[in-house]
Image: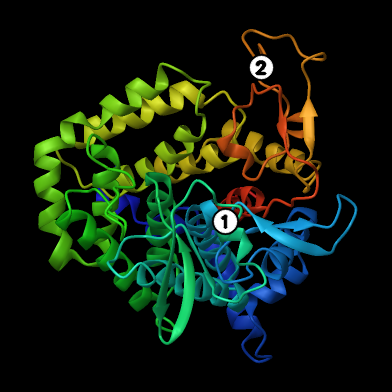
């Protein structure tokens, strides 16, 4: 059983003392020079870490035109000239994943740059709350007049586009916000709270974002409404997601959200496994659902004290892992590492998966492996496809490892968060 005290990340790090002790010793040794221990460690890093640092620099340079994660479109597959941006509709979810990645980066190395990256990303997420005018989460926001405003106005045809003013600056913002965008944000906020010290107002930003987003959801029957009156989604029927957000809420602001969590838990806590069971009946369709399940259940389970509901949460997570545990997924493996602790075989495999990821192209081209892999269904391989061969995509771990074809035109670059997040988690837990 995992008690709340046992599952706190600061305590988990001390249960695997080598990373923490290495950092402490480095702090002492470098104290006289004034150098950041994280920067010194990164300079001495191995190939995997050099790649992580390079991907991180490229992400900051090319994927954050206005603070949240967009994917650049180049003039051609061989060009480095950015002519547009795509995938802005998922800016909130991937910025939340980026916050988690850089939080583990800071916790593993003490890097001041990583801490600054978290702070900037949190400010960008705060804007996605402010820009809607009613504490609903926007998918993305772009200043009016930005050369990249077409990323919203043209490319996001499925979303409602609105215009508003924040601090005397005008923005276009994308609505029609889905549950996955909220899940990504709370996923990142939960880890940032525990892994980043209260420096530069970081915790104040987290409190404000959680307070506003969660307060709105509670007060509006867990159903976000756009300024034009349309309902973009609902969390009704997803007790796992409601309770995961409330777990983060009561950790961050217990005086407001502890009671709310316990009320929802008493009403729906024993139903948490139902949506996981339903989703697990189809391990191939809408595979991104399994990413959402992992990023919600990790906070729901690890932050739960010993209670009559904990076995239900545990059963839901076990069902999820039984469904996808053999899918060679480094991100899902690291979520399991947070919940269950070390496992030598799993952690060794995760390290190998990260090496395989580095052999993949960053540009999202098109791939069709129908003629090279046996099929056991329409567009589906019979066996898990090797990581290096899987179809190009933005975030590898939310795509089915059985998928035989897919991708785009080769002129869009993925942000690389699908490497950074499991890599820095692995560094934090001493796997690498």
Q: Earlier in the sequence, mark 2 or mark 1?
A: 1
Lateral position of residue 97 relative to residue 26, left or right: left
Instruction: Determine the CA span between mark 2 and mark 1.
Output: 27 Å
Q: In which quarter of the image is residue 250?
A: bottom left
**Residue sitting at 86 percent across and 52 percent down?**
76
Residue 379 image label:
2
Q: Quadrant of residue 47?
A: bottom right
- Which quadrant would the N terminus be assigned to in this image? top left
Labels 2 & 1 near each other (Cβ < 8 A): no
Residue 320 image label:
none
Res 308 seen here = no
Res 32 seen here = yes
Label 1 secondary element: helix
Residue 64 in picture, x, y percent from top left = 63, 67
Eyeballing the image, is 15 above or below 400? below
Q: Name the one closer to the observer, 173 or 30.
A: 173
**Residue sitting at 47 percent across and 42 percent down?**
335
Residue 88 image label:
1
Label 2 secondary element: loop
**Residue sitting at 72 percent across and 70 percent down?**
61
Q: Residues within 10 Å of mark 2 (few under 14, many from 20)?
A: some
Residue 2 in picture, x, y percent from top left = 29, 42
């Amino acid at each position: 059983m995992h008690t709340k005290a046992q599952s706190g990340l600061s305590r988990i790090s001390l249960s695997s003392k080598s990373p923490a002790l290495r950092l402490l010793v480095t702090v002492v040794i470098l104290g006289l020079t004034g150098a950041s221990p994280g920067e010194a460690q990164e300079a001495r890093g191995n190939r995997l870490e050099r790649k992580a640092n390079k991907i991180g620099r490229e992400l900051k340079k090319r994927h954050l035109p206005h603070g949240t994660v967009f994917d650049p479109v180049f003039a051609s597959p061989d060009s480095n000239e950015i002519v547009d941006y795509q995938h802005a509709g998922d800016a909130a979810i991937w910025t939340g994943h980026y916050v988690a990645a850089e939080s583990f980066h800071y916790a593993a190395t003490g890097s001041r740059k990583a801490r600054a990256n978290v702070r900037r990303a949190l400010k960008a997420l705060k804007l996605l709350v402010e820009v809607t005018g009613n504490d609903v989460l926007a998918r993305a926001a772009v200043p009016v007049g930005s050369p990249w405003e077409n990323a919203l106005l043209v490319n996001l045809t499925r979303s409602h586009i609105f215009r508003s003013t924040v601090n005397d600056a005008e923005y276009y913002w994308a609505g029609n916000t889905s549950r996955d965008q909220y899940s990504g944000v709370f996923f990142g906020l939960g880890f940032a709270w525990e892994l980043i010290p209260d420096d530069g107002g970081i915790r104040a930003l987290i409190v404000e974002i959680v307070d506003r987003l969660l307060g709105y959801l509670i007060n509006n029957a867990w159903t976000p409404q756009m300024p034009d009156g349309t309902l973009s989604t609902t969390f009704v029927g997803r007790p796992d997601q409601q309770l995961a957000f409330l777990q983060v809420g009561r950790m961050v602001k217990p005086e407001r959200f502890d009671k709310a969590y316990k009320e929802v838990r008493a009403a729906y806590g024993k139903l948490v496994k139902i949506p996981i069971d339903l989703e697990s009946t189809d391990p191939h369709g809408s595979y991104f659902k399994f990413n959402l399940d992992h990023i919600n259940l990790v906070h729901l389970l690890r932050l739960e004290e010993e209670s009559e509901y904990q076995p239900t949460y545990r059963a839901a997570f076990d069902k999820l892992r039984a469904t996808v545990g053999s899918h060679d997924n480094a991100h899902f493996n690291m979520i399991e590492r947070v919940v269950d602790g070390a496992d030598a075989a799993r952690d060794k495999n995760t390290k190998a998966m990260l090496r395989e990821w580095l052999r993949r192209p960053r540009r999202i081209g098109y791939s069709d492996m129908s003629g090279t892999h046996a099929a056991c269904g329409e567009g589906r391989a019979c066996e898990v496809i090797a990581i290096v061969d899987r179809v190009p995509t933005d975030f590898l771990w939310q795509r089915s490892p059985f998928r035989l074809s897919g991708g785009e035109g080769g002129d869009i670059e993925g942000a690389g968060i699908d490497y950074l997040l499991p890599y820095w988690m692995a560094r934090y837990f001493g796997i690498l």
